[in-house]
Amino acid sequence: MRRRDREITDNALIEAFVSEQKIIRIGFYDKGEIYIVPVNYGFVCENGKYIFYFHGAKAGRKYELAQADPEVGFEIDGEYRLVRSERACSCSAKYQSVIGNGVLSVVHNKDEKIKGLNCLMNHLANKSDCEYSKEALESVAVFKLCAKSLSCKANI
C-alpha cells in the first residue's frame, strides 16, 4: 500500500466497517477479460480470517466462473464524501475501502448452505436462524469466498 498513513490494521475497525456495508464486488478473470459483479453479502470473521457468503442463480456467468476459476479479487467501499476546494484539482475525498483476494466456491453441503444464507440474512435484515424450504435450498446457489489477503484503507 502506497499510503501507509491511511492503512487500517486494527481488525475491530475493519470488521466494524465490513459490518456496516452491504455490497461486495467480486472480480473474476474470464479468458482475458475482467468481470466484476456487485452482490449483497454476509460474513464471518474467524481468527482474523474473513469468509463472505452470497447467493445467486445456479446458472449464468457468475456461477460458471465460480466453478471454472476459484481465484477472485474483491472490494468493499463506503463512507465516500467529496471534499470540495475553490482551486481546480484541489478537491479530495473521504472514504474507506477494503480490497483483497481469495478463493471462491459453490456450497453444496446443506448445513453450510443454511449457515451462509443465515449469515446473509443476519447481515442484511438482522434476522438469524431463518427457515428455508427444501425447494428454496435446492434452487439457490450459495457462494463462499475465503479471503486469502485483505487490506483496508481510509481517509476519514
Image (cartoon, rainbow, N blue to C red):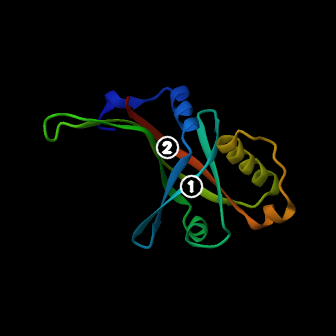
Q: How far apart are marks 2 and 1 (CA)?
A: 19 Å
The image's mark for residue 149 is 2
Q: How crowded is mark 1: few (under 14 residues within 10 Å), some or many (20 or more)?
A: some
10 Å crowding of disc 2: few (<14), some (14-19), many (20+): few
Horizontal and vertical percent position of residue 34: 42, 65
Q: Looking at the image, which is closer to me, 116 or 102? A: 116
**Residue pointed to by mark 1:** 39
Instruction: Tell me the quarter of the image containing the C terminus.
Output: top left
* Residue at left offset 43%, top offset 29%: 8
Q: Residue furthest front?
A: 86
Residue plotted at (52% across, 34% down): 17
Q: Is mark 2 on a helix, strand or loop?
A: strand
Camera-side mark, 2 or 1: 1
Q: Decide: marks 2, 1 in contact (CB < 8 A)?
A: no
Quarter assignment of residue 29: bottom left
Position of residue 37 measured from the top left corner of the image (x, y, whole percent): 50, 60
Q: What residue type is labelled 2?
A: Ser
Residue in view at x 81 percent, y 43 percent: 129
Looking at the rendered image, the quarter that the N terminus falls into is top left
Q: Which residue is depicted at the point 76% across and 67% down?
A: 139
Task: Please determine whether, in this image, residue 62 is positioned above or below residue 130.
Answer: below
Q: Determine whether 31 is above or below 5 in the image.
A: below
